[in-house]
Image (spheres, rainbow, N blue to C red):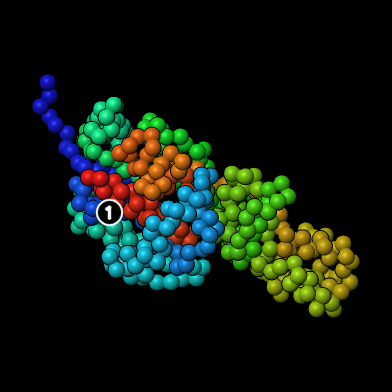
Amino acid sequence: MSLYTPPSFEIAVVGAGAAGLMAALWAARGGAKVVLLDGQEKAGGKILISGGGRCNVLPIDARDPVEASFHTSGSQNVLKRLFKTWKLAEIQDFVRWELEVPLVEEDDNKLFPESGKAKDVRDALVREAERCGASIVYDWRVTEIEKSDPNNSRKGFVLRSESGEELRALKVILATGGESVPATGSDGFGYRLAKKLGHKLVPTYPALVPLTTTDEALTALAGLSLPVAWRAVVEGKEVARGERSFLFTHKGYSGPAVLDASHYVIRDNATIHIAWEASTRQEWIDYLQSRARRTVSRTVADLLPNRLAALLVERSGVRGEMRCGNLTRTTFDYLLEQLCDFRLPVSGNRGFAVAEVTGGGIGLDSLDPSTLESRKTPGLYLCGEILDVFGDIGGFNFQWAFLSGKLAGECAAKPL
Ligand SMILES: Cc1cc2nc3c(=O)[nH]c(=O)nc-3n(C[C@H](O)[C@H](O)[C@H](O)COP(=O)(O)OP(=O)(O)OC[C@H]3O[C@@H](n4cnc5c(N)ncnc54)[C@H](O)[C@@H]3O)c2cc1C
């Protein structure tokens, strides 16, 4: 008989990313004895690379309704309810005044740490979690979570690590993230842990991901960036639209507009229609008609970058040296199609290796929406990107990680 008793905690949080750090912090504030485990040698690997190393920590303003910025295949009502638990303004105050990270506003509705360093956000979360009493253990990759007594959930859980260590906890919060950029430690293994504990996985796919094309005339525009209005169209019906900046790359397209639109292409097989410079059909009509004596090429190039203007005029089949006033109704329409309803040719996407988040994940329907406790395994809570929720580009994903982490942490600590 072994005399060894594994270390014992009230709450074990698995995964020290944005959601797990927030969960550990609030569980510890609630008075629980908390351990936070991460398979990597440091916390918040993804926070460090976020926003190009500057961390777009939150949006400035929330969009109304919630589903204008956040996506799930689960219940929209549950999503709305979750977002009422910690309002955006309250999270901003928390970051500013309790984590003591001064924030600055930038264009496109984004908040960044004043220092311009993502590390300051990560360090502040770690500092506050530890100050509240959570113990953080690195290089502890959880490979197994089992109920201590299969017939009695009150007896808690046993967690085992890759190197054969063991610890016990009355409750477990699973915050292992999705499967995007697996080098940061979130490689999708958390889904297996959740599935073993009774949860179903909504099929996952790369989201907020650059798209690719084999159209060499378009990849030759690499480096060109401009504002666009985009529409995602499925079987002739518009399913989403937005206005943000668009970037041509050597492999295809990126920038906030493309990242936001990408999941409609990947998940729903949508085609993306682009209005360059976000100008509407009527604006183009008025503009072209008011320049009847000017050539088409010059007129289009006055509003769009030269190389793109030349390409669009060529693809419309209109001779660039024609005067705008001489366009026939049909050629006018061909030109308008290229300018404000351009069908983006897409051959694929850059995959999980570069996707900012994972679409799909553990379904919300298997959780109690007021606590994020599992309905399948009482005592288990889930939060962050492991769940079937993600947000648009612009700090929305940290908003989700923070609010779901807080809810799971607070609620797990309460009955204790
Ligand atoms: C390049 C890039 C840039 C981004 N920029 C932004 C941005 O500017 N703003 C924004 O809002 N969002 C951004 N995001 C998205 C955002 O980073 C994530 O949505 C968010 O970090 C998810 O937090 P999480 O805690 O749920 O998961 P993660 O941050 O992925 O954390 C999960 C943690 O769990 C650990 N782990 C996994 N499995 C195990 C295991 N078995 N045992 C122990 N530990 C485990 C991992 O090591 C990791 O530390 C960006 C993402 C990427 C990839």
Image location (x, y in percent) of residue 261: 59, 54
Assess disc 1: are there few (<14), some (14-19) or many (≥20) residues with their C-alpha within 10 Å of its C-alpha: many
Which is nearer the eye, 388 or 18? 388
Task: Kindly identify which residue carries mark 1.
Answer: 26
Q: Secondary structure at mark 1?
A: helix
Question: In what quadrant of the picture does the N terminus appear?
Answer: top left
The quadrant where residue 344 appears: bottom right
Question: In what quadrant of the picture does the C terminus appear?
Answer: top left
Q: In the rendered structure, which amino acid carries the disc numbered 1?
A: Trp
Which is nearer the eye, 1 or 327? 1
The residue positioned 48% from the left and 64% from the top of the image is 62
The residue positioned 23% from the left and 38% from the top of the image is 169
Image location (x, y in percent) of residue 407: 34, 52
Relative to 73, residue 200 above or below: above
74 displayed left or right of 196: right
The residue positioned 20% from the left and 57% from the top of the image is 131
Residue 11 visible in image: yes
Image location (x, y in percent) of residue 162: 28, 33
Image location (x, y in percent) of residue 195: 41, 33
